[in-house]
Image: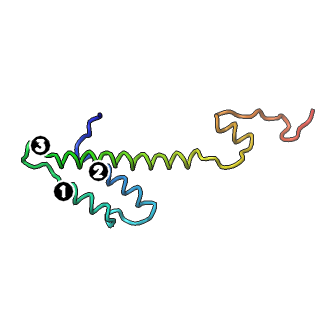
Amino acid sequence: MAALGSPARTLRGLLRELRYMNEAMGRPYRDTAAYRYLVKAFRAHRVTSEKLCRAQHELHFQAATYLCLLRSIREHVALHQEFHGKGERSVEESAGLVGLKLPQQPGGKGWEP
């Protein structure tokens, strides 16, 4: 299993994903219940003087897993919007999609020798 990194980094990543989601809706992310819950949970599970704080590690693991889910969903939506089929394409559009160009006729369209 990969290392989780620091809890602060995970919290910043979660807050970044909240910002991305709320930008689309046009409202500040700090006004959401999700923001208040995340900050409250991370403050409640800070590292204490204990040598092993199981609840803090469990929260961090769950937060990192949720962050991975949110990032994956955002990236999936972006990829889907970019590559989703837009119906029937012309030959020129299809060729351009794979990086090819169609040869140009010397006299333009409909030119006959």
Residue 107 or residue 79, whichever sits in front: 79
> Which residue does the image show at 18% across and 56% down from the upper left?
43
| Secondary element at image label 2 | helix
Indicate the position of residue 110 as horizontal and vertical percent values: 88, 41
Residue topped by disc 1: 43
> Which residue does the image show at 30% across and 45% down from the upper left?
64
Q: How is the image coloured?
A: rainbow
Amino acid bearing label 2:
Arg
Mark drawn on residue 52: 3
> Which residue does the image show at 50% across and 48% down from the upper left?
78
Q: Is residue 83 left or right of residue 113?
A: left
Amino acid bearing label 1:
Arg
Residue 91 or residue 62, whichever sits in front: 62
| Secondary element at image label 3 | loop
> Which residue does the image show at 36% across and 56% down from the upper left?
18
The answer to whether the residues at label 2 and label 3 have Cβ atoms under 8 Å apart is no
Mark nearer the viewer, 2 or 1: 1
Q: Residue furthest right?
A: 113
Structural distance between the alpha carbons of marks 2 and 1: 13 Å
Residue topped by disc 2: 12
Q: Is residue 106 left or right of residue 75?
A: right
- Could you say which quadrant of the image residue 92 lies in? top right
Q: Earlier in the sequence, mark 1 or mark 3?
A: 1
Amino acid bearing label 3:
Leu
Indicate the position of residue 112 as horizontal and vertical percent values: 92, 35
Indicate the position of residue 66 as horizontal and vertical percent values: 34, 49
Structural distance between the alpha carbons of marks 1 and 3: 17 Å
Mark drawn on residue 65: none
